[in-house]
Amino acid sequence: MTEAAFLHGGALDAAMQRYGGARQDWLDLSTGINPVPPPLPALSPDAWARLPEAMDEERLLSAARSFYGRGEAIVAAPGSQALISAWPRLFAPRRAAVLSPTYGEHAASLRAAGHAVLEIADLDAVPDDVRLLVVVNPNNPDGRLSDPAQLRALAGRLVRRGGLLVVDEAFMDATPEQSLAGEAVEGSGLLVLKSFGKYFGLAGLRLGFAFCGATLAGRLSTQFGPWAVSGPALAIGAALLQAEAQTGHIRADLHAQARRTAEVLQSGGLTVRAMTPFFCLVDHEDAHRLHQALAARHVLTRPFAYAQRWLRIGNLADDAAADRLRLRLAERP
């Protein structure tokens, strides 16, 4: 098994096949997902037994508006990845750009839909013939935060060309003051994507949102058909979004987790190149060797094929996890 098996994060089964150990033996830091999900609300048996009703979805969307920002229209989908795969199919093939390096599925989905994709390193150098532009903000994996004012200006330029700016805010929700979700309205040239699972630590629920104008929302909804989001996901999403909009407890916890993680990494002699409230990016002279050394000690991290010096490390859940990582870092060659 090659290192390619670990290039998406969360590949714990592959790690166990290669390095041994049972699931409970591992400290999985390979994703940028909140490691401490909130308690699940009690669900009615009807959420499992019947098809979702329109009112179930409306409760979810109302809670999403309160938590993320009003916007104009919201599309709920079975995960933000489903939205990443779907929206490029709404446009005839054209010139597209992705601010890179970043989450690889954006460029892959654009190419699969027939678009000519240019990967760019600087938003000041977007070619004039680009009609579709994707920016992950904050970026995964380097934590780069794009200026909202610059993004608004780019969206304005693109909409005048009949284009669209897509902002993937999967890691934005711990810093909501930087979000553009509430500005994604008809004529704005904006499509903003949100990931419920990363912030709430419930990636397996498969729930994501798209904020955009009403026309685009109608077209995007047709890509998923009826009952796209399960009854349990609608109910859990509505309850947790509503509670967090009132308390902000998870947001505070994420910031505390990130501070703890950065402190452990730095005390272990590693250089934290960048961080978000969800993960740290380590710069190391041989990151792949460090990944292997930690995996041999049952700590899973995320290497990158395109950056031999980078290793992404997700948040530590608690002091016990912090102590365990300190020990494993001290043991490495």
Image (tube, rainbow, N blue to C red):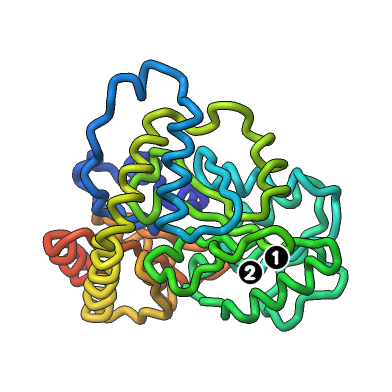
Question: Could you tell which of marks 1 and 2 lies nearer the N-terminus?
Answer: 2
**Residue 73: x, y in percent?**
60, 50
Provide the residue designation for mark 1. 188
Q: Is residue 306 left or right of residue 20?
A: right
| Residue at position x 78%, y 74% in the image | 157
In the rendered image, which quarter contains the C terminus? bottom left
Q: Is residue 305 left or right of residue 213?
A: left
Q: Could you say which is closer to the camera, residue 9 or residue 214?
A: 214
The residues tagged by marks 1 and 2 sit, at their Cα atoms, a distance apart of 23 Å
* Up-down relation of residue 25 to residue 226 (above or below): below
Residue 3 visible in the snapshot:
no
Q: Amino acid at mark 2?
A: Ser
Badge 2 marks a residue whose secondary structure is loop
Provide the residue designation for mark 2. 100
* Up-down relation of residue 132 to residue 22 (above or below): below
| Residue at position x 41%, y 45% in the image | 11
Which class describes the residues within 10 Å of circle 2: few (<14), some (14-19), or many (20+)? many
Q: Amino acid at mark 1?
A: Ser
Q: Could you say which is closer to the camera, residue 286 or residue 142?
A: 142
| Snapshot quadrant of residue 188 | bottom right
Q: Is residue 208 left or right of residue 246?
A: right
Q: How many marks?
A: 2
**Residue 21: x, y in percent?**
24, 42
**Residue reaching furthest to the top:** 49
| Snapshot quadrant of residue 132 | bottom right
Q: Could you say which is closer to the camera, residue 261 or residue 18?
A: 261
* Up-down relation of residue 155 to residue 192 (above or below): below
